[in-house]
């Protein structure tokens, strides 16, 4: 991985054809979840609490057999601190994997049949909480079909709505 890849998080969707509304909702959910993590973390809280917050930018977009997108935080005139991006993206990937593992398994009729006790239901959480934001992101990510999220040497794979983490 080269130096410019260090502050990017990459997403790959197995389908080369993604609906505009699906992609738009995915990006909205992603942005809200990443900003919530940025505000929650003591190392990055100041960066996300003021008026001059870093923005998420698409820095790579491609499609062939799969749809690929890379995103990074940056200011309009300078890059965001790569160490702080590392903190946010690493925490995001870990929490996303944890929530994917804990999320409900669905029956043939689409109803939840099991849910690990460690995950709260969305209805019992503060709608503005980071966990609620991440649960919404995970729900949407699973609707996007088979996918991968890659940051540095870690890769979260979602296949048939089940998650695995490679390091």
Image (tube, helix red, strand yellow):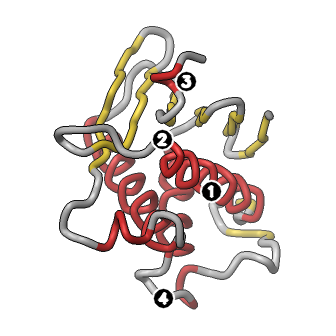
- Are circles 1 and 3 on residues that touch, CB within 8 Å? no
Q: Along the polypeptide, which appears first: circle 3 or circle 2? A: 3
Which residue corresponds to the image point at 39% horizontal and 57% vertical from the top-left? Answer: 29
- Which x, y percent locates residue 65? 50, 11
Along the viewing direction, whichever of 112 and 41 lies nearer the viewer: 41
Query: Which numbered circle lies on residue 126?
Result: 4
Q: Along the polypeptide, which appears first: circle 3 or circle 4? A: 3
Q: Which residue is mark 3?
A: 14
Along the viewing direction, whichever of 154 and 126 lies nearer the viewer: 154
Q: Nearer the viewer, mark 4 or mark 1?
A: 1
- Which x, y percent locates residue 90? 62, 49
Q: Along the polypeptide, which appears first: circle 4 or circle 2? A: 2
**How many residues crowd mark 4 within 10 Å: few (<14), some (14–19), many (20+)?**
few
Q: Quadrant of the C terminus?
A: top right
Which residue corresponds to the image point at 55% horizontal and 80% vertical from the top-left? Answer: 122
- Vertical side of 164 occupied by 90: above or below: below
Q: Along the polypeptide, which appears first: circle 2 or circle 1? A: 2
**Considering the numbered disc 3 on the image, is that residue within a helix, a strand or a loop?**
loop
- Which x, y percent locates residue 74? 30, 42
- Are circles 4 and 2 on residues that touch, CB within 8 Å? no
Q: Which residue is mark 1?
A: 91
Q: Which residue is mark 2?
A: 82
Q: CA distance from mark 2 to mark 1?
A: 14 Å
Along the viewing direction, whichever of 114 and 38 lies nearer the viewer: 38
Q: Nearer the viewer, mark 1 or mark 3?
A: 1
Query: Which numbered circle lies on residue 156?
Result: none
Q: Nearer the viewer, mark 4 or mark 2?
A: 2
Q: CA distance from mark 1 to mark 3?
A: 24 Å
In the image, farthest residue toward the top: 64
**Considering the numbered disc 4 on the image, is that residue within a helix, a strand or a loop?**
loop
Which residue corresponds to the image point at 69% horizontal and 34% vertical from the top-left? Answer: 155
Q: Nearer the viewer, mark 2 or mark 1?
A: 2
């Amino acid at each position: 991985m080269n130096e410019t890849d260090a502050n990017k998080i990459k997403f790959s969707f197995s389908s080369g054809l993604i609906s505009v509304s699906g992609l738009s909702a995915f990006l909205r959910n992603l942005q809200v979840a990443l900003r919530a993590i940025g505000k929650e973390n003591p190392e990055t809280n100041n960066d996300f609490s003021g008026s001059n917050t870093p923005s998420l930018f698409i820095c790579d977009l491609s499609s062939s057999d799969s749809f690929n997108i890379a995103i990074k935080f940056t200011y309009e005139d300078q890059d965001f601190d790569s160490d702080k991006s590392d903190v946010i993206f690493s925490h995001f990937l870990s929490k996303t994997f944890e929530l994917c593992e804990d999320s409900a398994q669905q029956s043939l009729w689409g109803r939840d049949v099991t849910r690990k006790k460690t995950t709260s239901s969305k209805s019992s959480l503060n709608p503005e909480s980071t966990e609620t934001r991440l649960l919404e992101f995970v729900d949407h990510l699973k609707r996007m079909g088979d996918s991968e999220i890659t940051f540095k040497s870690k890769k979260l794979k979602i296949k048939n709505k089940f998650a695995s983490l490679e390091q």
